[in-house]
């Protein structure tokens, strides 16, 4: 049976912090594991939290990034306790974050994306829907959750209105190819999938006419990557979108706004990808790199 404190914390993260569902899942899971360790959340000290983190890191073979997520989850929980007047201090606030190496996001080439999209059978209703869906995700750099939450009214042919993290809204141009596929889906496919559910507002729906879930989208995407012989995730489309924009000459601030990043430092990771690609090209082709 779930602890009441975990349920109350989950409600706080959702309604007050408005965090993404994936982040909420991580934070509540880490809190549940922390509670199972038998530590008293009312009196636990910084030293005890540190010992717990060290032990969990060894037991679960956590990477530096995973340890950082664990600390963020616990720090957030004790901040919650402070806000609710349940504790005066935060025993995690002074614990240092582990040093992390720069982990570059996975990016697919334009040829690989075309190969992925090319394996989708658009003669089938669900196939046509999937082609429109993944064309739009790549064309606009969408998160899966953003794509699933799109309503028909959010689509304006030349642009879409997206509700991102913390309910922030942004308007993103839609590329010509994606627009053609989405228009065809709306005209030929969606009415048949929706059937009698005429009140359904979701842009992308399943075979029963209900809004697509993230799990369903991931499952379909995985089947296509396997068919195309590619080892990428659906989030790779978003990373590729940003990288291809920068490669084409887009400025960093514009890409930040299109992705919905609140901090430009998050967007700057894609400049490291560009630098890495240039270094690889230099090492491969420049005469001075030969030994």
Image (cartoon, grey):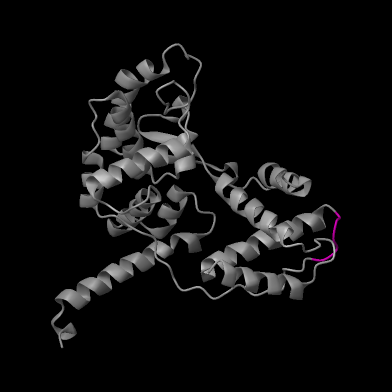
Say whether residue 139 is visible. no
Residue 43 percent location from the top left of the image: 84, 66
Tell me the residue at 13%/82% (across/down).
Answer: 287
Tell me the residue at 47%/35% (across/down).
Answer: 148
| Vertical order, 146 against 34 (above or below) | above
Q: Nearer the viewer, residue 220 or 262?
A: 220
Tell me the residue at 39%/61% (across/down).
Answer: 105
Q: Quadrant of residue 59?
A: bottom right
Q: Quadrant of residue 47?
A: bottom right
Is 3 on the left-hand or right-hand side of 242?
right
Q: Nearer the viewer, residue 36 or 176?
A: 36
Residue 86 counted in the magenta span = yes
The C terminus, quarter of image: bottom left
Q: Nearer the viewer, residue 43 or 77?
A: 43
Is 182 on the left-hand or right-hand side of 53?
left
Residue range of the region highlighted in magenta in the rendering: 85-89
Tell me the residue at 26%/25% (across/down).
Answer: 124
Residue 84 percent location from the top left of the image: 83, 52
In the current view of this chain or complex, which residue is farthest to the top?
Answer: 196
Q: Quadrant of residue 87?
A: bottom right
């Amino acid at each position: 049976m779930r602890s009441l404190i975990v349920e109350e914390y989950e409600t706080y993260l959702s309604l007050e912090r408005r965090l993404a569902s994936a982040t909420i899942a991580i934070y509540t899971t880490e809190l549940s594991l922390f509670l199972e360790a038998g530590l008293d959340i009312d009196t636990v000290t910084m030293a005890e939290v540190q010992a717990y983190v060290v032990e969990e890191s060894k037991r679960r073979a956590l990477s530096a990034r995973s340890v950082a997520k664990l600390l963020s989850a616990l720090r957030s929980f004790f901040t919650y306790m402070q806000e609710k007047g349940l504790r005066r201090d935060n025993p995690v606030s002074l614990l240092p974050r582990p040093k992390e190496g720069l982990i570059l996001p996975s990016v697919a080439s334009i040829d690989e994306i075309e190969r992925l999209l090319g394996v989708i059978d658009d003669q089938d209703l669900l196939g046509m829907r999937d082609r429109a869906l993944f064309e739009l995700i790549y064309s606009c750099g969408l998160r899966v959750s953003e794509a699933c939450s799109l309503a028909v009214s959010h689509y304006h042919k030349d642009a879409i209105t997206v509700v991102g993290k913390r309910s922030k809204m942004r308007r993103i141009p839609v590329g010509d190819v994606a627009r053609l596929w989405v228009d065809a889906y709306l005209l030929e496919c969606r009415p048949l999938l929706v059937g009698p559910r005429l009140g359904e507002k979701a842009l992308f729906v399943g075979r029963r006419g209900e809004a697509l879930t993230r799990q369903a989208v991931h499952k379909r995407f995985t089947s296509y990557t396997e068919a195309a012989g590619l080892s990428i995730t659906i989030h790779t489309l978003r990373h590729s979108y940003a990288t291809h924009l920068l490669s084409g000459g887009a400025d960093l601030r514009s890409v930040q706004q299109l992705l919905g990043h609140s901090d430009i430092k998050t967007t700057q990771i894609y400049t490291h990808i560009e630098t890495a690609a240039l270094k690889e090209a230099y090492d491969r082709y420049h005469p001075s790199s030969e030994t």
